[in-house]
Amino acid sequence: PSGRNWWLEAINARQAWDYSDYFSTVNIGVVDSGFDTNHEELEGKIVFPTFLHKMCNIPDLHGTHVAGIIAAKHNNGVGISGICDNSKLIGVDWYPYLIPLWNTELAIYFGLSNCVKSGAKVVNFSLGTSSSSEGVYMSAMDESITPAAVSYMMASLLSKGYDFVAVQSAGNGDVNGDPIDSRQNGHFANINENNINTGSYEIEPEEIMERILIVGAVDNAGK
């Protein structure tokens, strides 16, 4: 497809919109930098798990951009149309930079739980930590500790009856702009059968793996 909306056509968004009434029942969590809740494309669409999360939200371009791709208002004559424009977004700001001693890793870790417990069936993590890496080096934190912690959180939620999908971006490449394996992006992207940790919960590794989607990007070959 060509034109400014080629990306919508490439993922068959127009056909999906025939079922948009069903989307309204699917709450979507967005764990990202802060959100502009007064943006004309997002006004009234974003809620927060708790009052504290609302107070910690500091509007940022990245979080607002991601939220818009997901759920910007449809056919309002402004900007773009979000993929799931009828859905409610549950936002968690992973980096309110004005708050001292904030731990972004913990915010991401608990962001999944915060969103799922607040009713999210899909939780989006547009993480790009691989851009700080060079080559194929992975720290012990990325290789085992973080995946073990994240999978343990998922197992805990599944054991309590929550049903959800975690979606993470594949990454931004390395510091030289070269593509690298999505495992380099850590978190959900590097969870595998060898580093899954379900603790004492009776959850099979497959139940964790089947609820993780790692999403890459494509360019328009025509341009």
Image (cartoon, rainbow, N blue to C red):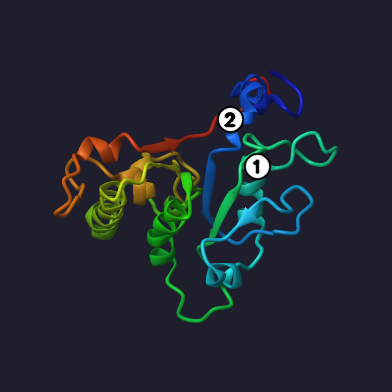
Q: Mark 2 or 1, which is nearer the eye?
A: 2
Q: What residue is rendered at 70% in x and 59% in y?
A: 37
**Which mark is on residue 22?**
2
Whether residue 91 is situated above or below residue 219 in the rendered picture: below
Q: What residue is rendered at 71% in x and 50% in y?
A: 42
Name the outermost residue toward the right: 77
Q: Residues within 10 Å of mark 1 (few under 14, many from 20)?
A: many
Which quadrant holds residue 13? Answer: top right
Name the outermost residue toward the bottom: 100
Q: Nearer the viewer, residue 145 or 86?
A: 86
Residue 156 spot, x, y in % from top left: 27, 53
Q: Is residue 186 left or right of residue 23?
A: left
Whether residue 124 is situated above or below residue 56 in the rendered picture: above
Whether residue 61 is situated above or below residue 169 in the rendered picture: below
- Quadrant holding the C terminus: top right
Q: Is residue 183 left or right of residue 103?
A: left
Which mark is first along the chain, 1 or 2? 2
Report the amino acid beneath label 1: Ala
Residue 132 spot, x, y in % from top left: 44, 56
Q: Nearer the viewer, residue 84 or 138?
A: 84
**Which mark is on residue 52?**
none
- Residue placed under numbered mark 1 in the picture: 71
Whether residue 56 is situated above or below residue 162 in the rendered picture: below
Label 1 residue SS: helix
Q: CA distance from mark 2 to mark 1?
A: 14 Å
Report the amino acid beneath label 2: Tyr
Residue 141 spot, x, y in % from top left: 27, 60
Q: Residues within 10 Å of mark 2 (few under 14, many from 20)?
A: few
Label 2 residue SS: helix
